Amino acid sequence: MRIRLDIAYDGTHFRGWARQPGLRTVQGTLEGALARVLGGDPRLVVAGRTDAGVHASGQVAHLDLADDQRTRLVSRREGGNAVGALAARLTGVTGAYSDVAVTRTSSAPEGFDARFSAVWRRYEYRLADRTAGYDPLDRLRTTTVRAALDAPAMHEAARSLIGLHDFAAYCKPREEASTIRTLLEFDWHRDERGVLVANVKADAFCHSMVRALVGACVAVGEGRLDIADVVQIRDAGLRVPEVKVLAARGLTLSEVGYPDDALLAARAEQTRARRDAD
């Protein structure tokens, strides 16, 4: 029995998603809550492993239940929807004002894999410059820069990077990991308060890719790089000091996209095969 979990969290006080001995992580916190509700040793598979300090409003994970966990779950009738009621039971464990919440639990369709069935991920990055000003109420989810940034130039630079490319210049290298990605959307706008918000969508992201792409656009917005430079840096394939990896606090995983249910298993198989080939 496989369950889909939709998850939100404030990453400020987590050392990232992935379980690490002796450290507080999102995965460790949720698996501990699941163990209290279901028993056993639950293990979550997640759509995207976020780094320390990164937030999520649309994270997705799945959980496979052992027979005894399934029995324990359905023994609580919950009006006939024990799976749907699991989210509320987890809130009872994590607490009403916890920095992590399972917002929805549902029976996963056949072939669903939270990680390998995903076809794209979307992130948002919030940036307050001198134009927007500093808001202490938003300090945990917004990065501040002490400059008045050129938003139209940042938007044009972002748009120039869209497509299938090798993004090694905008990734922290990992041994034997591919840095070829399809950047589907990348744009900037100012919200009603003037805060700069980046929308970044790709089939997948390599390590620190979003924060490095945002850093390149900030360099353009400050006038340290020209718009054409961001493409030249990408095509050269080398990291440069002008491109800073910005703080994790401004980054939120906002959405994960999946194909129609009939295509979930095929997508998962295709993704696994590609990862094995990489």
Image: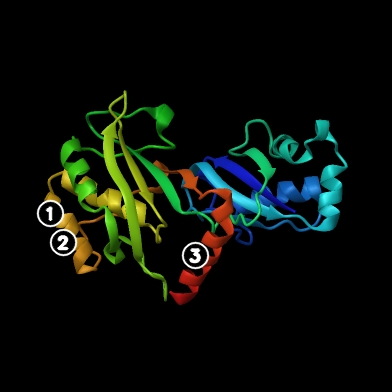
Mark 1 residue crowding within 10 angstroms, few (<14) / some (14–19) / many (20+) = few
Establish if 165 lies above or below 144.
below
Q: Quadrant of residue 239?
A: bottom left
Q: Is residue 158 left or right of residue 263?
A: left
For mark 2, give the secondary structure. Answer: helix
Q: In x, y percent, where is residue 158? A: 24, 47
For residue 24, say whether it is visible. Answer: no
- For the residues bearing labels 2 and 1, Cβ distance under 8 angstroms: yes
Q: Give the residue at x 58% y 53%.
A: 262
Residue under label 3: 271
For mark 3, give the secondary structure. Answer: helix
Q: Give the residue at x 23% y 52%.
A: 216
Amino acid carrying mark 3 in the image = Thr
In which quadrant is the C terminus drawn? bottom left
Amino acid carrying mark 1 in the image = Ala
Q: In x, y percent, where is residue 263? A: 54, 55
Which sits in the foreground, 240 or 229? 229
Residue 228 is labelled as 1
Q: In x, y percent, where is residue 178? A: 38, 70
- For the residues bearing labels 3 and 2, Cβ distance under 8 angstroms: no
Q: Give the residue at x 74% y 36%.
A: 85
Q: Is residue 261 left or right of residue 278?
A: right
Q: Nearer the viewer, mark 3 or mark 2?
A: 3
Q: CA distance from mark 3 to mark 2?
A: 29 Å
Establish if 181 lies above or below 78.
below
Q: Give the residue at x 16% y 41%.
A: 153
Residue under label 2: 232
